[in-house]
Image (cartoon, rainbow, N blue to C red):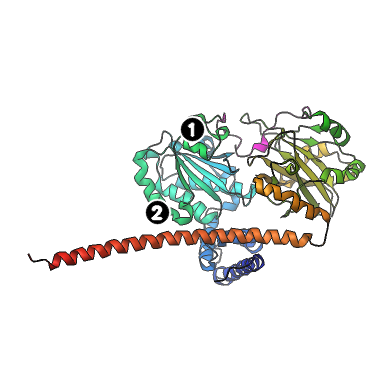
Amino acid sequence: MAELDPQEAEQDLERKIEETRQRFKNELLQDSSGKYDSRDVERLQTDNALVEGYLTWRLYVVDDALKMIDESLQWRKDFSVNDLNESVIPRWMFESGAVYLHGYDKEGNKIFWFKVKLHVKDTKTTMDKKKYVAFWLERYAKKEPGMPLTVVFDMAESGLSNIDMDFVKYVINCFKVYYPKFLSKMIIVEMPWIMNAAWKIVKTWLGPEAISKLRFASRSEVQTYIGPEYLPPHMGGMDPFKYSYPPLPDDEFQTPICDNGPIVSEDDTESKECELESRETLESSFNSEIVTKTKKVNFLDDSFRAEDNDKGDSNVRTRGARKPLTTFKGPLLDVSPAEELSFGSGETEKKCLIILCNVTKNQVAYKVRTTAPEKYRVKPSSSSCEPGASVEIVVSLHGSYQASPQDRFLVMAAEMDNAGSQDLAQFWKEVPKAKIMEHRLRCNVLESGKALAGPLRDSFVETGTSGQEELNTALMRVMACNSRLEQKVNACVWMQKVLVGLVFVLMVLNLQCLYLLGTAGRPS
């Protein structure tokens, strides 16, 4: 089969997405009669990334993807996944600390912790436990769509009484069927030898895609995947985090230092620019009622910005900044880039651009926050955007700091009713949380080769030539094509291993037959 070029590959993907939707409608939806949640059906019809996730996980075989979609949507209806919240989960489960999200691995993926010693098999609570896991996964899927998780089974001090094979199979199915492409890797830490037989059974449930993501690690080996700053002391780490509830410990953005604290210190060169552009402050957390002591994070917030200064210095601020190539379509703002900011190690790779476009008919207030305020300067980090207008925000590394995959940014936005008379600081204190749009961005650290290519690509974008759109489109197609080719190569490698194994088995059987024939031909 001839290899498809990027444009043909993208068109082929679009055809498969449309085919999947049409066949779902004709073959599964007509006689469903309440089989699925209408909210999930609507999302399947509108979210290309969701359909692509199922197709990718099933190697673009539409029949297999439809089976997966059917099973996944039925599960979501049976478990009322769209309506899961803290009030419907027994409080003791949150207080136990057996399952939670906290920290990041070395690749910047969120860590989903399972404390196996805290799990005891009990048929009376099985359904609640399964809904508890679904609650965490759905919460994360909504907060950081498309971003994978690293699952860690902490087996320290656990024994056979803590192994619930039905529950383990359910957790595996969550990543194998219900949340495709969510699993980055699954790390089993300090597994007792007595559980080897149980895990051999578990491996048969995983399938080839998930087995390739399985890692068994000792106390020392786990640091290959997770840095000591996010490992507990019993794994040789230095993370002081201790689980407690409330609040939910999955969101570092909710941990403030203080209200209206001092400005972040800058060097002499940048302090002059800072005086001209803004007065930077530290604001409270996203939810002022949630206060934890697990991790201190403060945020940059420009409280005031003169409109004329912003327009006059716009070209100076954005010069040399990496331009975004993708866009997230939000209900209030379109956010570019869609998922991540890319920083390199060179001096010319320390600036990125966030572009916000107001898609409403009202003025929208926005602010940008980060989990690493000592590293980054965000200009402007808080202001408002007129209807139909766009604003460019420069995110730059400060001093000698380097970006890390663990760093995160949060874009918050809310519509302003009386824009002319509202003070931004007061507005953010009074706006209901339900009316705030949130979109998260993570940091991507470019390799040296890619970092060197960055200025060249940006120079083309900055020229404003007619080839800009074609260049951006071509880059996106190449990235999509590479992803699909990687999936196909992995499938071919796996099939090759299977064939080698079969050949070996046939050779052994052939030798046995020859031996038996030789034995039968000998005189007694």
Image coordinates for residue 306, horizontal then vertical, percent: 90, 39
What residue is rendered at 14% in x and 67% in y? 520
Image coordinates for residue 313, horizontal then vertical, percent: 88, 43
Question: Nearest the camera: 430 or 452?
Answer: 452
Label annotation for residue 447: none
Image coordinates for residue 86, horizontal then vertical, percent: 59, 42
Residue 2, above or below 197: below
Question: Nearest the camera: 114 or 149?
Answer: 149
Question: Nearest the camera: 196 or 452?
Answer: 452
Q: Outermost residue toward the left? A: 524
* Residue wearing tag 1: 235
Question: Nearest the camera: 314 or 460?
Answer: 460
Contact, mark 2 vs mark 1 (Cβ under 8 Å): no
* Residue wearing tag 2: 204
- Asked if residue 156 lies left or right of residue 46, the reply is left
Is 490 one of the magenta-colored residues? no
Res 51 → quadrant: bottom right
Q: Residues within 10 Å of mark 1 (few under 14, many from 20)?
A: many
- Asked if residue 97 lies left or right of residue 141, the reply is left
Locate the N terminus and report the quarter of the image it occupies.
bottom right
Locate the C terminus and report the quarter of the image it occupies.
bottom left
Res 419 → quadrant: top right
- Asked if residue 511 lies left or right of residue 303, the reply is left
**Magenta span: chief secondary structure:** loop
Image coordinates for residue 280, horizontal then vertical, percent: 81, 33
What residue is rendered at 71% in x and 41% in y? 346
Please say whether residue 414 is visible from this viewpoint.
Answer: yes
Label 2 secondary element: helix
Give the amino acid at mark 2.
Answer: Thr
Which span of residues is magenta-colored?
239-264
Give the spatial CA distance, label 2 vs label 1: 28 Å
Is 260 one of the magenta-colored residues? yes
